[in-house]
Amino acid sequence: MAHVITDTCKKDNLCLDACPSEAIRPLKDEANWESVPQLYINPDDCMDCGACVVECPTNSIYPSDELPASKAQFAEINAKYFKK
Ligand code: SF4
């Protein structure tokens, strides 16, 4: 299991700074940061600590097994970002 960022993400980067496993990308100095609509969590690196959830001001992050049905597609969208 992993945590998942959904489309209400505003890219404030607070989650990224809180993540102990560097699972959230892109970083602000990466070339594609401006163009991506949101941040993403790498399911292979996430250790499900939940530190990102409490930092998110828009409540955009969920454990994958607690995603609302309307946001279920974001588990794959997060994983897909890291398969590029
Ligand atoms: S749950 Fe923990 S390890 Fe996973 S993305 Fe959030 S802060 Fe990082």
Image: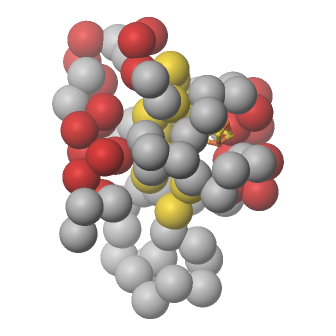
Q: Is residue 74 left or right of residue 20?
A: left
Ligand 1 lies in which image quarter? top right
Q: Quadrant of residue 6?
A: top left
Q: Nearer the viewer, residue 34 or 84?
A: 84
Q: Where's residue 12, x and y in %?
A: 65, 57
Q: Residue at x 35, y 76 (%)?
A: 35
Q: Where's residue 4, x and y in %?
A: 44, 34
Q: Nearer the viewer, residue 13 or 50?
A: 50
Q: Is residue 14 left or right of residue 3?
A: right
Q: Up-down: is 27 above or below 13?
A: below
Q: Where's residue 38, x and y in %?
A: 42, 56
Q: Is residue 78 left or right of residue 54?
A: left
Q: Is residue 27 left or right of residue 54?
A: left
Q: Residue at x 29, y 35 (%)?
A: 74
Q: Nearer the viewer, residue 81 or 55?
A: 81
The N terminus: image quadrant: top left
Q: Residue at x 57, y 52 (%)?
A: 23
